[in-house]
Image (cartoon, helix red, strand yellow):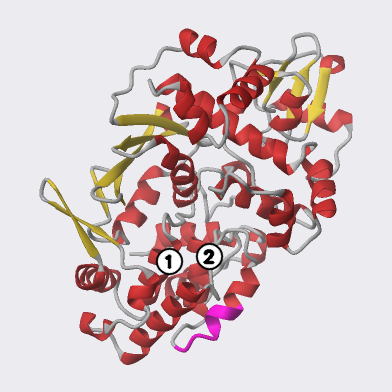
Amino acid sequence: MTPLATPDFQTIIARRDPRYDGRFYFGVKTTGIYCRPICPAQPKPEHIVIFKSLSEAEKSGYRPCLRCHPDSAPGHRLWDGTITTVSRALRLLHDSTEDELTLGRLAANLGITDRHLRRLFDDHLGASPIEILITRRLHFAKQAIRETKTSITTIALASGFKSIRRFNEAFKTRFSQSPSAFRKAHPAASHADRLTLRIPIRAPYDWLTTISYLKRHETYGIEYIEDHTYQRFIPRKKSFGSIRVSPMNKGTFLKAEFTDIPLKDIPPILARLKHAFDTDHNPAHLPASKSILPNGIRVPGSFDPFETAIAIILSQLVSTAQAKTNLKTLVQLFGRKLGTEGAKEVYAFPAPKVLAYARVEKVGLTRGKAGAIRALSRAVARGTLDFHLHRDFSEVSERLLKIKGIGPWTAMMIRMRCLQDPDAFPVTDLVIQKAIKKLGINPTAWASARAYLTHCLWRDHNS
Protein backbone atom coordinates (compact mmCIF):
# COMPACT_ATOMS: atom_id res chain seq x y z
CA MET A 1 0.00 0.00 0.00
CA THR A 2 1.33 3.46 -0.88
CA PRO A 3 2.40 5.27 2.31
CA LEU A 4 -0.25 7.75 3.39
CA ALA A 5 -0.28 10.37 6.12
CA THR A 6 -3.00 10.60 8.75
CA PRO A 7 -4.84 13.44 6.94
CA ASP A 8 -4.92 11.29 3.78
CA PHE A 9 -6.61 8.43 5.64
CA GLN A 10 -9.10 10.85 7.18
CA THR A 11 -9.97 12.26 3.74
CA ILE A 12 -10.45 8.76 2.30
CA ILE A 13 -12.76 7.82 5.19
CA ALA A 14 -14.72 11.07 4.91
CA ARG A 15 -15.46 10.48 1.21
CA ARG A 16 -15.95 6.70 1.71
CA ASP A 17 -13.62 6.04 -1.21
CA PRO A 18 -14.30 2.49 -2.52
CA ARG A 19 -10.86 2.33 -4.15
CA TYR A 20 -9.36 1.81 -0.70
CA ASP A 21 -11.86 -0.78 0.48
CA GLY A 22 -9.88 -3.76 1.73
CA ARG A 23 -6.56 -1.87 1.66
CA PHE A 24 -6.85 -0.63 5.25
CA TYR A 25 -9.31 -0.47 8.15
CA PHE A 26 -9.99 2.17 10.77
CA GLY A 27 -10.86 1.82 14.41
CA VAL A 28 -12.86 4.24 16.53
CA LYS A 29 -11.16 4.74 19.89
CA THR A 30 -14.35 5.75 21.70
CA THR A 31 -16.33 2.63 20.70
CA GLY A 32 -13.68 -0.06 20.23
CA ILE A 33 -15.14 -0.85 16.79
CA TYR A 34 -13.22 -1.16 13.52
CA CYS A 35 -14.64 -0.43 10.06
CA ARG A 36 -13.99 -0.43 6.33
CA PRO A 37 -13.16 2.94 4.73
CA ILE A 38 -16.56 2.84 2.98
CA CYS A 39 -18.49 2.60 6.26
CA PRO A 40 -21.39 5.09 6.66
CA ALA A 41 -20.08 5.88 10.15
CA GLN A 42 -18.33 9.25 10.30
CA PRO A 43 -16.31 9.41 13.53
CA LYS A 44 -14.39 12.51 14.57
CA PRO A 45 -10.90 12.50 13.02
CA GLU A 46 -9.20 12.57 16.41
CA HIS A 47 -10.96 9.31 17.36
CA ILE A 48 -9.65 7.37 14.34
CA VAL A 49 -6.83 4.82 14.45
CA ILE A 50 -5.60 3.13 11.24
CA PHE A 51 -5.00 -0.61 10.87
CA LYS A 52 -3.30 -2.38 7.97
CA SER A 53 -5.43 -5.52 8.24
CA LEU A 54 -8.43 -6.88 10.13
CA SER A 55 -6.00 -9.18 11.96
CA GLU A 56 -4.16 -6.15 13.32
CA ALA A 57 -7.45 -4.51 14.33
CA GLU A 58 -8.71 -7.58 16.16
CA LYS A 59 -5.31 -8.22 17.75
CA SER A 60 -5.55 -4.67 19.14
CA GLY A 61 -8.89 -5.49 20.80
CA TYR A 62 -11.28 -3.88 18.31
CA ARG A 63 -14.46 -5.68 17.25
CA PRO A 64 -16.03 -5.56 13.74
CA CYS A 65 -18.64 -2.97 12.85
CA LEU A 66 -22.18 -4.29 12.40
CA ARG A 67 -22.90 -1.79 9.61
CA CYS A 68 -20.04 -2.38 7.15
CA HIS A 69 -19.07 -5.90 8.33
CA PRO A 70 -15.29 -5.73 7.75
CA ASP A 71 -14.93 -9.31 9.01
CA SER A 72 -16.94 -10.61 6.05
CA ALA A 73 -15.67 -8.20 3.38
CA PRO A 74 -13.91 -9.43 0.24
CA GLY A 75 -10.15 -9.80 0.40
CA HIS A 76 -7.82 -7.29 -1.16
CA ARG A 77 -5.27 -7.56 -3.93
CA LEU A 78 -1.79 -6.13 -3.68
CA TRP A 79 0.47 -5.54 -6.66
CA ASP A 80 3.65 -3.58 -6.43
CA GLY A 81 7.15 -4.08 -5.04
CA THR A 82 7.57 -6.18 -1.91
CA ILE A 83 3.83 -6.15 -1.43
CA THR A 84 3.57 -8.60 -4.34
CA THR A 85 5.34 -11.16 -2.15
CA VAL A 86 2.85 -10.50 0.62
CA SER A 87 -0.01 -10.95 -1.85
CA ARG A 88 1.39 -14.29 -3.00
CA ALA A 89 1.84 -15.37 0.63
CA LEU A 90 -1.76 -14.42 1.42
CA ARG A 91 -3.04 -16.45 -1.52
CA LEU A 92 -0.98 -19.43 -0.38
CA LEU A 93 -2.33 -19.08 3.17
CA HIS A 94 -5.92 -18.81 1.99
CA ASP A 95 -5.55 -21.80 -0.35
CA SER A 96 -3.75 -23.99 2.16
CA THR A 97 -5.43 -27.11 3.50
CA GLU A 98 -2.41 -27.96 5.66
CA ASP A 99 -3.06 -27.90 9.40
CA GLU A 100 0.67 -27.96 9.98
CA LEU A 101 1.58 -25.13 7.58
CA THR A 102 4.58 -23.42 9.15
CA LEU A 103 6.21 -20.05 8.66
CA GLY A 104 9.34 -21.80 7.39
CA ARG A 105 7.44 -23.80 4.76
CA LEU A 106 5.52 -20.71 3.64
CA ALA A 107 8.74 -18.69 3.30
CA ALA A 108 10.46 -21.53 1.43
CA ASN A 109 7.61 -21.69 -1.10
CA LEU A 110 8.14 -17.97 -1.73
CA GLY A 111 11.92 -18.23 -1.98
CA ILE A 112 12.66 -15.94 0.98
CA THR A 113 13.69 -16.34 4.62
CA ASP A 114 11.06 -16.62 7.35
CA ARG A 115 12.56 -13.55 9.05
CA HIS A 116 12.11 -11.49 5.88
CA LEU A 117 8.55 -12.78 5.47
CA ARG A 118 7.66 -11.79 9.05
CA ARG A 119 9.05 -8.32 8.43
CA LEU A 120 7.07 -7.90 5.20
CA PHE A 121 3.82 -8.96 6.89
CA ASP A 122 4.43 -6.60 9.78
CA ASP A 123 5.19 -3.70 7.42
CA HIS A 124 2.19 -4.22 5.14
CA LEU A 125 -0.45 -5.88 7.34
CA GLY A 126 0.60 -5.27 10.93
CA ALA A 127 0.23 -8.97 11.74
CA SER A 128 2.26 -12.15 11.34
CA PRO A 129 1.43 -14.86 8.78
CA ILE A 130 0.28 -17.16 11.59
CA GLU A 131 -2.02 -14.45 12.96
CA ILE A 132 -3.49 -14.01 9.49
CA LEU A 133 -4.05 -17.77 9.22
CA ILE A 134 -5.74 -17.93 12.65
CA THR A 135 -7.95 -14.99 11.67
CA ARG A 136 -9.01 -16.79 8.50
CA ARG A 137 -9.85 -19.95 10.47
CA LEU A 138 -11.77 -18.06 13.15
CA HIS A 139 -13.88 -16.19 10.62
CA PHE A 140 -14.76 -19.39 8.78
CA ALA A 141 -15.73 -20.96 12.13
CA LYS A 142 -17.83 -17.93 13.01
CA GLN A 143 -19.69 -18.16 9.72
CA ALA A 144 -20.21 -21.92 10.11
CA ILE A 145 -21.57 -21.50 13.67
CA ARG A 146 -23.95 -18.76 12.51
CA GLU A 147 -25.23 -20.57 9.43
CA THR A 148 -25.18 -24.29 10.31
CA LYS A 149 -26.29 -26.63 13.07
CA THR A 150 -23.05 -28.60 12.94
CA SER A 151 -21.52 -29.29 16.34
CA ILE A 152 -18.99 -26.75 17.57
CA THR A 153 -16.38 -29.48 17.99
CA THR A 154 -16.76 -30.50 14.33
CA ILE A 155 -16.56 -26.85 13.26
CA ALA A 156 -13.42 -26.30 15.34
CA LEU A 157 -11.64 -29.26 13.74
CA ALA A 158 -12.89 -28.38 10.24
CA SER A 159 -11.56 -24.84 10.71
CA GLY A 160 -8.04 -26.14 11.32
CA PHE A 161 -7.83 -26.14 15.13
CA LYS A 162 -6.36 -29.28 16.67
CA SER A 163 -8.25 -29.04 19.97
CA ILE A 164 -11.62 -27.69 21.11
CA ARG A 165 -9.98 -26.01 24.11
CA ARG A 166 -7.59 -24.02 21.91
CA PHE A 167 -10.46 -23.11 19.58
CA ASN A 168 -12.69 -21.90 22.44
CA GLU A 169 -9.89 -19.76 23.85
CA ALA A 170 -9.04 -18.21 20.47
CA PHE A 171 -12.72 -17.56 19.63
CA LYS A 172 -13.46 -15.93 22.99
CA THR A 173 -10.32 -13.81 22.84
CA ARG A 174 -11.14 -12.61 19.33
CA PHE A 175 -14.93 -12.14 19.57
CA SER A 176 -15.41 -11.51 23.33
CA GLN A 177 -17.83 -14.41 23.71
CA SER A 178 -17.70 -18.19 23.62
CA PRO A 179 -18.69 -20.15 20.51
CA SER A 180 -21.75 -21.54 22.32
CA ALA A 181 -22.87 -18.06 23.38
CA PHE A 182 -22.44 -16.82 19.80
CA ARG A 183 -24.52 -19.72 18.48
CA LYS A 184 -27.28 -19.02 21.00
CA ALA A 185 -27.45 -15.44 19.75
CA HIS A 186 -27.41 -16.55 16.08
CA PRO A 187 -29.52 -19.73 15.67
CA ALA A 188 -29.05 -21.48 12.32
CA ALA A 189 -31.67 -23.07 10.07
CA SER A 190 -29.57 -25.18 7.66
CA HIS A 191 -30.47 -28.73 6.72
CA ALA A 192 -28.16 -31.51 7.89
CA ASP A 193 -26.97 -32.35 4.37
CA ARG A 194 -27.04 -28.81 3.00
CA LEU A 195 -25.12 -25.69 3.92
CA THR A 196 -25.53 -22.19 2.53
CA LEU A 197 -22.72 -19.65 2.89
CA ARG A 198 -22.40 -16.11 1.59
CA ILE A 199 -19.32 -14.99 -0.32
CA PRO A 200 -18.94 -11.21 -0.09
CA ILE A 201 -18.23 -9.21 -3.25
CA ARG A 202 -17.83 -5.53 -4.03
CA ALA A 203 -20.54 -4.03 -6.20
CA PRO A 204 -20.92 -3.59 -9.04
CA TYR A 205 -20.51 -7.22 -10.09
CA ASP A 206 -21.34 -8.11 -13.69
CA TRP A 207 -22.81 -11.53 -12.94
CA LEU A 208 -24.43 -11.92 -16.34
CA THR A 209 -21.13 -11.51 -18.24
CA THR A 210 -19.25 -13.74 -15.80
CA ILE A 211 -21.78 -16.58 -15.85
CA SER A 212 -22.17 -16.31 -19.63
CA TYR A 213 -18.41 -16.70 -20.08
CA LEU A 214 -18.36 -19.74 -17.79
CA LYS A 215 -21.35 -21.20 -19.67
CA ARG A 216 -19.48 -20.97 -22.97
CA HIS A 217 -16.55 -22.84 -21.43
CA GLU A 218 -18.26 -25.25 -19.02
CA THR A 219 -16.87 -28.77 -18.58
CA TYR A 220 -19.46 -31.43 -19.39
CA GLY A 221 -20.34 -33.77 -16.53
CA ILE A 222 -18.53 -31.63 -13.97
CA GLU A 223 -20.21 -28.23 -14.12
CA TYR A 224 -23.60 -27.16 -15.42
CA ILE A 225 -24.92 -23.63 -15.82
CA GLU A 226 -28.68 -23.18 -16.04
CA ASP A 227 -30.88 -20.15 -15.36
CA HIS A 228 -27.74 -18.10 -14.60
CA THR A 229 -26.84 -20.43 -11.73
CA TYR A 230 -23.54 -22.30 -11.57
CA GLN A 231 -23.50 -25.92 -10.39
CA ARG A 232 -20.41 -28.05 -9.91
CA PHE A 233 -20.09 -31.66 -8.75
CA ILE A 234 -17.42 -32.64 -6.25
CA PRO A 235 -16.17 -36.26 -6.26
CA ARG A 236 -16.25 -38.15 -2.96
CA LYS A 237 -15.03 -41.67 -2.18
CA LYS A 238 -18.17 -43.53 -3.27
CA SER A 239 -20.43 -40.72 -4.43
CA PHE A 240 -20.40 -36.99 -5.14
CA GLY A 241 -21.54 -33.73 -3.63
CA SER A 242 -22.49 -30.51 -5.36
CA ILE A 243 -22.19 -26.74 -5.15
CA ARG A 244 -24.58 -24.17 -6.54
CA VAL A 245 -23.56 -20.51 -6.85
CA SER A 246 -25.89 -17.59 -7.58
CA PRO A 247 -26.00 -13.85 -6.81
CA MET A 248 -27.95 -12.41 -3.87
CA ASN A 249 -28.57 -9.17 -1.99
CA LYS A 250 -28.42 -6.94 -5.08
CA GLY A 251 -24.92 -7.99 -5.99
CA THR A 252 -23.20 -7.66 -2.61
CA PHE A 253 -22.89 -11.42 -2.04
CA LEU A 254 -22.74 -14.66 -3.95
CA LYS A 255 -24.75 -17.47 -2.41
CA ALA A 256 -22.93 -20.81 -2.28
CA GLU A 257 -25.06 -23.86 -1.50
CA PHE A 258 -23.17 -27.03 -0.55
CA THR A 259 -24.93 -30.41 -0.66
CA ASP A 260 -23.42 -33.65 0.67
CA ILE A 261 -20.00 -32.08 1.24
CA PRO A 262 -18.27 -32.55 4.62
CA LEU A 263 -17.65 -29.31 6.51
CA LYS A 264 -13.89 -29.99 6.65
CA ASP A 265 -13.77 -29.89 2.84
CA ILE A 266 -15.54 -26.54 2.55
CA PRO A 267 -12.72 -24.05 3.38
CA PRO A 268 -10.52 -25.07 0.41
CA ILE A 269 -13.61 -25.28 -1.83
CA LEU A 270 -14.58 -21.75 -0.79
CA ALA A 271 -11.09 -20.55 -1.74
CA ARG A 272 -11.48 -22.17 -5.18
CA LEU A 273 -14.88 -20.58 -5.68
CA LYS A 274 -13.48 -17.16 -4.82
CA HIS A 275 -10.82 -17.62 -7.49
CA ALA A 276 -13.32 -18.91 -10.05
CA PHE A 277 -15.63 -15.93 -9.57
CA ASP A 278 -12.94 -13.29 -8.87
CA THR A 279 -14.69 -12.20 -5.69
CA ASP A 280 -11.75 -10.28 -4.19
CA HIS A 281 -11.57 -7.78 -7.03
CA ASN A 282 -12.35 -4.15 -6.26
CA PRO A 283 -14.05 -2.64 -9.37
CA ALA A 284 -13.28 0.90 -8.23
CA HIS A 285 -9.63 0.38 -9.20
CA LEU A 286 -10.25 0.07 -12.95
CA PRO A 287 -9.95 3.00 -15.36
CA ALA A 288 -12.99 4.03 -17.35
CA SER A 289 -13.47 5.99 -20.55
CA LYS A 290 -16.17 6.77 -23.09
CA SER A 291 -15.17 3.74 -25.14
CA ILE A 292 -14.69 1.28 -22.25
CA LEU A 293 -16.89 1.10 -19.16
CA PRO A 294 -15.89 -1.76 -16.83
CA ASN A 295 -19.35 -1.85 -15.15
CA GLY A 296 -18.39 -4.55 -12.67
CA ILE A 297 -16.40 -6.74 -15.08
CA ARG A 298 -14.62 -9.74 -13.56
CA VAL A 299 -11.97 -12.16 -14.80
CA PRO A 300 -13.35 -15.69 -14.37
CA GLY A 301 -10.63 -17.90 -12.90
CA SER A 302 -10.71 -21.64 -12.45
CA PHE A 303 -11.98 -24.05 -9.84
CA ASP A 304 -9.57 -26.74 -11.07
CA PRO A 305 -6.54 -25.17 -12.82
CA PHE A 306 -5.45 -28.43 -14.50
CA GLU A 307 -8.92 -28.94 -15.95
CA THR A 308 -8.98 -25.33 -17.18
CA ALA A 309 -5.50 -25.57 -18.69
CA ILE A 310 -6.53 -28.64 -20.70
CA ALA A 311 -9.68 -26.83 -21.85
CA ILE A 312 -7.57 -23.86 -22.98
CA ILE A 313 -5.32 -26.11 -25.07
CA LEU A 314 -8.42 -27.68 -26.64
CA SER A 315 -9.67 -24.21 -27.62
CA GLN A 316 -6.60 -23.38 -29.71
CA LEU A 317 -7.52 -22.41 -33.29
CA VAL A 318 -11.10 -23.75 -33.11
CA SER A 319 -14.46 -22.21 -32.32
CA THR A 320 -15.70 -22.05 -28.74
CA ALA A 321 -18.48 -24.50 -29.60
CA GLN A 322 -16.02 -27.02 -31.10
CA ALA A 323 -13.69 -26.71 -28.11
CA LYS A 324 -16.59 -27.38 -25.76
CA THR A 325 -17.59 -30.46 -27.77
CA ASN A 326 -14.01 -31.77 -27.71
CA LEU A 327 -13.85 -31.22 -23.95
CA LYS A 328 -17.05 -33.22 -23.49
CA THR A 329 -15.65 -36.09 -25.55
CA LEU A 330 -12.40 -36.06 -23.57
CA VAL A 331 -14.31 -36.26 -20.27
CA GLN A 332 -16.51 -39.11 -21.52
CA LEU A 333 -13.54 -41.09 -22.89
CA PHE A 334 -11.04 -40.61 -20.08
CA GLY A 335 -12.97 -39.30 -17.07
CA ARG A 336 -14.51 -41.41 -14.30
CA LYS A 337 -18.30 -41.56 -14.30
CA LEU A 338 -19.68 -40.98 -10.81
CA GLY A 339 -23.39 -41.38 -11.52
CA THR A 340 -26.27 -39.14 -12.48
CA GLU A 341 -28.35 -36.37 -10.95
CA GLY A 342 -31.68 -36.30 -12.72
CA ALA A 343 -30.85 -36.12 -16.41
CA LYS A 344 -27.29 -34.90 -15.76
CA GLU A 345 -24.31 -37.22 -16.11
CA VAL A 346 -21.70 -36.68 -13.40
CA TYR A 347 -17.99 -37.27 -14.01
CA ALA A 348 -14.65 -36.71 -12.31
CA PHE A 349 -12.21 -34.96 -14.65
CA PRO A 350 -9.37 -37.26 -15.81
CA ALA A 351 -6.33 -36.96 -13.56
CA PRO A 352 -2.97 -35.77 -14.94
CA LYS A 353 -1.54 -39.30 -14.68
CA VAL A 354 -4.43 -40.58 -16.83
CA LEU A 355 -3.94 -38.01 -19.62
CA ALA A 356 -0.14 -38.23 -19.43
CA TYR A 357 -0.11 -41.23 -21.77
CA ALA A 358 -3.69 -41.30 -23.08
CA ARG A 359 -4.50 -41.59 -26.79
CA VAL A 360 -6.28 -38.25 -26.77
CA GLU A 361 -6.23 -38.25 -30.57
CA LYS A 362 -9.46 -40.25 -30.16
CA VAL A 363 -11.14 -36.95 -29.28
CA GLY A 364 -10.47 -35.81 -32.84
CA LEU A 365 -7.41 -33.70 -32.09
CA THR A 366 -4.34 -33.03 -34.18
CA ARG A 367 -1.16 -34.83 -33.18
CA GLY A 368 0.34 -31.53 -32.06
CA LYS A 369 -2.53 -30.64 -29.74
CA ALA A 370 -2.73 -34.19 -28.38
CA GLY A 371 1.01 -34.11 -27.70
CA ALA A 372 0.72 -30.81 -25.86
CA ILE A 373 -2.00 -32.24 -23.60
CA ARG A 374 0.11 -35.30 -22.80
CA ALA A 375 3.24 -33.23 -22.15
CA LEU A 376 1.44 -30.80 -19.84
CA SER A 377 -0.23 -33.69 -18.02
CA ARG A 378 3.11 -35.44 -17.50
CA ALA A 379 4.66 -32.24 -16.15
CA VAL A 380 1.81 -31.79 -13.67
CA ALA A 381 1.83 -35.48 -12.68
CA ARG A 382 5.59 -35.36 -12.03
CA GLY A 383 5.37 -32.09 -10.11
CA THR A 384 7.61 -30.15 -12.49
CA LEU A 385 4.70 -27.82 -13.28
CA ASP A 386 1.95 -26.65 -10.98
CA PHE A 387 -0.63 -23.91 -10.97
CA HIS A 388 -0.47 -22.84 -7.33
CA LEU A 389 -1.44 -19.18 -7.09
CA HIS A 390 1.80 -18.24 -5.33
CA ARG A 391 3.87 -19.22 -8.36
CA ASP A 392 5.71 -16.53 -10.30
CA PHE A 393 3.73 -15.74 -13.45
CA SER A 394 6.76 -15.44 -15.74
CA GLU A 395 8.32 -18.64 -14.42
CA VAL A 396 5.19 -20.65 -15.20
CA SER A 397 4.95 -19.04 -18.65
CA GLU A 398 8.53 -20.06 -19.44
CA ARG A 399 7.79 -23.67 -18.49
CA LEU A 400 4.59 -23.70 -20.54
CA LEU A 401 6.27 -22.29 -23.63
CA LYS A 402 8.84 -25.11 -23.54
CA ILE A 403 5.99 -27.56 -24.20
CA LYS A 404 5.66 -28.20 -27.93
CA GLY A 405 2.20 -27.12 -29.06
CA ILE A 406 1.77 -24.37 -26.45
CA GLY A 407 2.24 -20.86 -27.79
CA PRO A 408 2.03 -17.32 -26.34
CA TRP A 409 -1.80 -17.13 -26.51
CA THR A 410 -2.26 -20.42 -24.62
CA ALA A 411 0.37 -19.54 -22.01
CA MET A 412 -1.22 -16.13 -21.43
CA MET A 413 -4.72 -17.60 -21.11
CA ILE A 414 -3.43 -20.11 -18.54
CA ARG A 415 -1.80 -17.24 -16.63
CA MET A 416 -5.07 -15.33 -16.70
CA ARG A 417 -7.44 -18.09 -15.63
CA CYS A 418 -5.31 -20.62 -13.73
CA LEU A 419 -2.88 -18.28 -11.97
CA GLN A 420 -5.16 -15.22 -11.76
CA ASP A 421 -2.58 -12.88 -13.24
CA PRO A 422 -4.54 -9.58 -13.34
CA ASP A 423 -2.23 -8.21 -16.03
CA ALA A 424 -2.38 -11.23 -18.37
CA PHE A 425 -3.04 -9.86 -21.84
CA PRO A 426 -3.50 -12.20 -24.84
CA VAL A 427 -2.47 -9.55 -27.32
CA THR A 428 -2.49 -12.01 -30.24
CA ASP A 429 -6.23 -12.68 -29.79
CA LEU A 430 -8.02 -11.50 -32.95
CA VAL A 431 -10.99 -9.96 -31.11
CA ILE A 432 -8.62 -7.99 -28.89
CA GLN A 433 -6.54 -6.77 -31.83
CA LYS A 434 -9.61 -5.61 -33.79
CA ALA A 435 -11.16 -3.87 -30.77
CA ILE A 436 -7.93 -2.03 -29.91
CA LYS A 437 -7.56 -0.83 -33.49
CA LYS A 438 -11.21 0.19 -33.75
CA LEU A 439 -11.24 2.10 -30.45
CA GLY A 440 -7.70 3.43 -30.56
CA ILE A 441 -7.02 2.05 -27.09
CA ASN A 442 -3.66 2.34 -25.38
CA PRO A 443 -3.42 -0.82 -23.22
CA THR A 444 -0.73 0.77 -21.02
CA ALA A 445 -3.49 2.84 -19.40
CA TRP A 446 -4.65 -0.47 -17.93
CA ALA A 447 -1.20 -1.47 -16.64
CA SER A 448 -1.47 -4.16 -13.91
CA ALA A 449 -5.11 -4.78 -14.87
CA ARG A 450 -5.05 -5.72 -18.56
CA ALA A 451 -6.87 -9.01 -17.91
CA TYR A 452 -9.89 -6.85 -17.05
CA LEU A 453 -9.42 -4.84 -20.23
CA THR A 454 -9.41 -8.17 -22.12
CA HIS A 455 -12.77 -9.20 -20.69
CA CYS A 456 -14.26 -5.76 -21.30
CA LEU A 457 -13.31 -6.06 -24.98
CA TRP A 458 -14.57 -9.63 -25.25
CA ARG A 459 -17.85 -8.61 -23.65
CA ASP A 460 -18.40 -5.61 -25.94
CA HIS A 461 -16.87 -6.78 -29.24
CA ASN A 462 -17.07 -10.58 -29.38
CA SER A 463 -20.02 -10.79 -31.74
Q: Quadrant of the C terminus?
A: bottom left
Classify 10 Å Cα crowding around label 1: few (below 14), some (14-19), many (20 and above). Answer: many
- Residue 50: quarter of image: top right
Mark 1 and mark 2 residues within 8 Å of each other at the beta carbon:
yes
Residue 268 is inside the magenta segment? no
Residue 401 is inside the magenta segment? yes
Q: Earlier in the sequence, mark 1 or mark 2?
A: 1
Magenta range is: 398-404
Viewer can see residue 88? yes
| Residue at image mark 2 | 387
Q: Determine whether 427 is above or below 349 in the image.
A: below
Classify 10 Å Cα crowding around label 2: few (below 14), some (14-19), many (20 and above). Answer: some
Amino acid beneath label 2: Phe
| Residue at image mark 1 | 306
Q: Position of residue 459 (x, y in %)?
A: 41, 57
Q: Quadrant of the N terminus?
A: top right
